[in-house]
Each structure stands twice: as structure tokens, then as C-alpha cells.
Amino acid sequence: MNRLYLKIILFFFIVSKLYSNNIQKIIVIGKKDTYINKYNNNSTYVITEDEIKKSGAKSITEILKNVPGIYIKRYGVISSPGVISIRGSSNEEILVLIDGNRINTSTAGGIDFSTININSIKKIEIIKNGNTAIYGEGAFGGIINIITKDNIEDIKYLKLKYTYGSFNTHIINLALSHYYKRFGYYLNISPLISDGGYLFNDQKRGDIKKRINTGINSLNIEYKLKYIINKYSYIQQGIKSYISERGVPGSIEFPTYSATMYDRNILTTFLYTYYKKSKINISLSYLNRYRHFINEDFFLGKIDEKNEVNSSEADIYLKRKNKMILNNIFKSGVDFQYQKLFSTDFEKSGILKYKGTISKSIYSLYIIEKIFLIKDKLIFNNAIRYTKSSLYPYRINYSSGIIFIFDKSEKNILKFSFENSYKEPSFEDLFLPDTGFAAGNPDLKPEEAINYEVSLSFSLYKWLKNSIIFYQKNINNLIQWQPGAGGKWRPQNIQKVKNTGIEFEQNMLFPINFYNSFLTITYNYSLMFATDKSDNPATYNKQLPYRPFETANLIINLSNNKLFSLQFESNFVGFRYLTAHNSKYLDSYLIHNLNFIIYLTSKLNFSFLVKNFTNNKYIDIRGYPVPGIEIYTSFRIKI
């Protein structure tokens, strides 16, 4: 424990040095109006703070795995990156927002979800179709909007949570909130320390080995400040920072026992909002993300790579409600993005044109309208966006949908949606220097897709809710990394891909005659066909690699808000092909988790989590075994 306290003190010292010495620019990002609600064209899945707490999840990927249509690929323990696929999309094709603010960059495109502090999350909203017209470039495979806590207008409080678990893992979370007259603040601090080092079964050699170099030291710090100018306007500013040092063990075939990754992410937010008859929203943004990778023992020589990306964004929009002729909501705005990457890889490659630095700018104009008819029971949604990029010609994207609400309780809803989306290749896709094993492809085209979705939500009884969704996505120029001549990996545009699927979910709620307890049961099932429709006869009509045909989840919770919560989860993932020719595959698997919370008082609780309690041995990515059973205990106190 003494070592834990010393490391926490060291982390605070490092962060103070980062803020005082290294940060030369202020990161400013505004909160966007995301239109994620029941009136959105696409089906929307919402995970609440209460659901996160009852699940015992220690990372975002652990809670997202319960969502129909989402498949999580794990590289290992809590220190490993979390990779998410929505309806067959890649991690790079998913737009991720924090409080409505874009955090994707053009370096590789995807987000490492292990860097986001789950303890600060209020809710997560997921849209499973791309929608560039509303959300901008990059909203291709889906949108995940992470809403963080602020509690700025609540009473003063202090919350402390401590977790200890498998692999000598320590997680501390401290949250403070206070509001005085027109001024409020919220602070969240969360260090994480874990040794890693779990046992796995090496099936190739038939023995048990220890997975080493999987430890992590990390620290999340974030705060929000809010000042209410008057009853019509306010300003809000905040900073989210993450630093970490972690081992990168590599695949079991090519282990990297000494490789280390250093990460530093700094995101600051600023927002001005005025809302009387019309809403005016002005936001600016700047994001700094730094990564340093060192591998002393690489067989071709020492690797020492540094990447730093700076991303800025400005967004201004006007939103107005009209009831004179048609009851509608009209929103129009302008958005500008600029991203600049410095990479020692590019600098060493001898590509003098770039000198280690690559930049890109994107600006767009957009209009969004919602029309409400028949006492708001019939809703038409339309959006259009003009986008111009410094790397590619201009694009025009559109979105259209109809919503039918059949009852006053709004439990029976039918939706139809149709939109197109696109995503530009990342800097790594285009310009990655030839490493001998991989190289970029400057001739890549942007990915394009047309999306269709029909969803029906209905409730036959008060205790039973159902939803069924049919979707189809027709993709052109899908970017896929593939081995070529000599085994070198390069990204290629697959001509055509067709994703078709069905998702079904049931939610049941049963009150129990025991101290006002209740039982909830949620079951969902997804069936997906992600097929290659290109001209290559060897891969035509084949399922794309790492896209499971089937996934299913069962969540059973018995709880009393004053006494306890007992939650059981089962997650099934069907088999997945490993190759484009569908010649090799990974077996399906089924894992079970159990989380038990005891509310000792209204301000003190204790929890016990067992992940994969049947100790099932499985892998999500070839060469990267995941742990078996994991156990964590936590206590939380509020003052």
C-alpha cells in the first residue's frame, strides 16, 4: 500500500509539471447539440449511470458489450486498448463524443476507450448508423456520445471510491462538487495502478505461461466550471486530462517484453450558450494528444517513436422553434476543423514533402429541421451538410427520416431513416512510412455508405418492452488493411460491402413483495451479415474478418435501492472468420459476470465483482489471450 501512495503522489507531481511547463496552448471545445433522443431518426441506445454502477464495469468497453449490435475485441487486461465494432464497423469508423465534443483525430482515426474515466460518466448514448449530415465527417459506422457528470447545480458533496482487484489493481476515484449563487465547479480525480501479469494457456505449445509486461500507471483529472450570466445565458469551461505509462506485450508469437507506451491527452472545453426565443451556441476547440512508444529489444533495432496531434474546432449555430405555420425546429450552423500531426516516423522516412508534419482542414455548413404534425405524433427529420476538405473534393451529405408515435405514453414508436455518410482515410492510412512490415497508401479514396433503418419499439404490457430493428448499409471503398506481396500490410479500398442485420431486445420489470425490491431482465440478440461484394471472386460474398454473425446478451438484476443490488450477466459472441477468404476462424464463446452491491447506509456501499466466473478461456484477437476469472472489491462513501 505504501508503494501505491507513493505512485499517486508522483502522478500528481507529474501532472502539475505538465500543466506548468509543457502545455503551451489552451484546449477549447464546446458542447454541441447532438439531437440524441427519442425524436432522432435512428434508433438510440442509452446506458444510464445506474446501469453502469450495477454492472460493476471498470471500463467503457465492459458496459458497451451489453448493447445489441456492438462487439468488443479485448487485447488483454485493463491496461489494454478497448476496440469497439458497431454493426460490423471498425473502431476507426466510429465517431466518439465527450459531452458532444469530437475527440477523434486524423492520426489513426480510432479511440482508445481505456483512456476514458468511467467513474465520471453520467450516461452513454449510442447511435448505430452513420449520419454525416448531422454529426460531420467521420460519423460513418456509428456515434458514441459520452455524457460526463457535473452536478454543478447540486448541493456540495465529496465522493470517494476505492477498488482493489486481480493483478494487484488499485483504482481510486475522488469527486468534488459545489455550487454558490451563480458559480459552480465539479472535480474528478482517478488514478489507476495495475501490475497485470496473468496466466494463459498457450495452445500452440500446450503449456501455461504468464503474460508479462501488461502493467499500467495512469491518472485521469477533469474539472468543469460554470457561470450563469442570467436566466438566458451561461458559460462553461473545463479540462479533461489523461496520462499513463503502460507495457505493450505484443502478440504471443512476437512478444515485446520491454516495450512501453507513454500517453498524454489534454482536452479543455469552453461553451457560451444563449437561449431565449432562439438558441445561439458558440464553441471553440483544441485537443492535444501525445504518444511515445519505446521498444528496446526489437529484432531490427531499437524503436523510439513519438506522435503528437493538435486538433482545433470551431462550431457556431442558431436554433429556433417556430409555431406560426408549421411546428418545427430549425437549426443551421458552420463548423471548422484543423488537425496537425507531427510524427518521428514520417520525419525519419525521408519524405521531405511532409518533414514529419502533416495537416488537414475541414469546414462545413449544415441545416437540420424537424417538423411536428398531428399533435407531435408524426415527425419529419431532414438534414443536409456541405463539407470541404483540404485533401479531398467537397461532399454533400443528407439525412431523412419519419417517426410515428402511436400513444400518449410514447412507448410504441415506429421509425424509418435514410442517410448517407463518409469518412476520409486517416494519416496513417495515407502516409504511414514503409516499415518493412506495413506501409500507407496515398491513393486511398474516402469511405462512402448509404444507410437504411427501420425500428419498432412497442410495449404489450406495462412490465414488458420490446424493440426490433432491421438495417442495411451499402458501403463503397471500405478501407481494409490486408497483406500483399511479400506479406507487407497495406490499406486497400474494397469496392463494395453490404452489411445487413436484425437486432431484437426485450426488457422486463417485475416488482417483488420484499422491501420494495424489483427484478429486471434484459435479453438482446443480434444477427449480422457483413459481406464482401467486390469483384474479387476469391472473396465475393464472404463475411468480413472479425465480424461475428451472432451476439447475444442476458442481464438479470435483483435490487433494492436502499439495501442491495445483485446483477448477473451472460455475453455470447459467435464465431468470427480471421481471413478474407473465410479459411480460418475463432471459436464462439460464452462468459458470465456477477456483481453484488450492499448499501450499508445511504452514503456508504460495498461491492464485489467476479468477471468470467466460469474461467472460460477465449480470445478476441489472434495472438492476444485475455485473462480468465477476475475479482474486484470496491467501497464508495459520500460526504
Image (tube, rainbow, N blue to C red):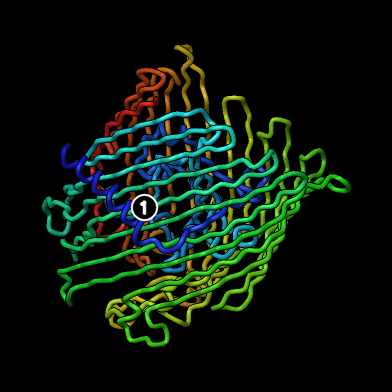
Figure quadrant of the N terminus? top left
| In this picture, residue 318 sits left or right of residue 201 | right
Residue 624, located in which quarter of the rendered image?
Answer: bottom left
Left or right of residue 546, residue 280 in this image = right
Q: Quadrant of the C terminus?
A: top left
Q: Kindly indicate the quadrant of the structure image that contains residue 613.
A: top left
- Give, as a three-letter code, the residue at label 1: Tyr
**Residue 193 to residue 332: above or below:** above
Q: Residue at x 48, y 33 (%)?
A: 178
Q: How many marks?
A: 1
Residue 166 or residue 463, whichever sits in front: 166
Q: Residue at x 22, y 67 (%)?
A: 294
Residue 539 can be seen, yes or no = no
Q: Residues within 10 Å of mark 1 (few under 14, many from 20)?
A: many
**Residue 55 to residue 129: above or below:** above
Q: Is residue 106 visible?
A: yes
Estimate the x, y position of residue 248 in percent, counting from the top left. Answer: 24, 59
Question: At which x and y percent is residue 372?
Answer: 78, 45
Q: Is residue 453 above or below residue 599?
A: below
- 113 or 18: which is nearer to us? 18
Name the residue at the right extreme.
325
Q: Which structural element holds mark 1?
A: strand
Q: Measuring from the top left, give residue 293's x and y in whole percent.
A: 26, 66
Relative to residue 452, is residue 318 drawn left or right? right
Q: Which residue is mark 1?
A: 242
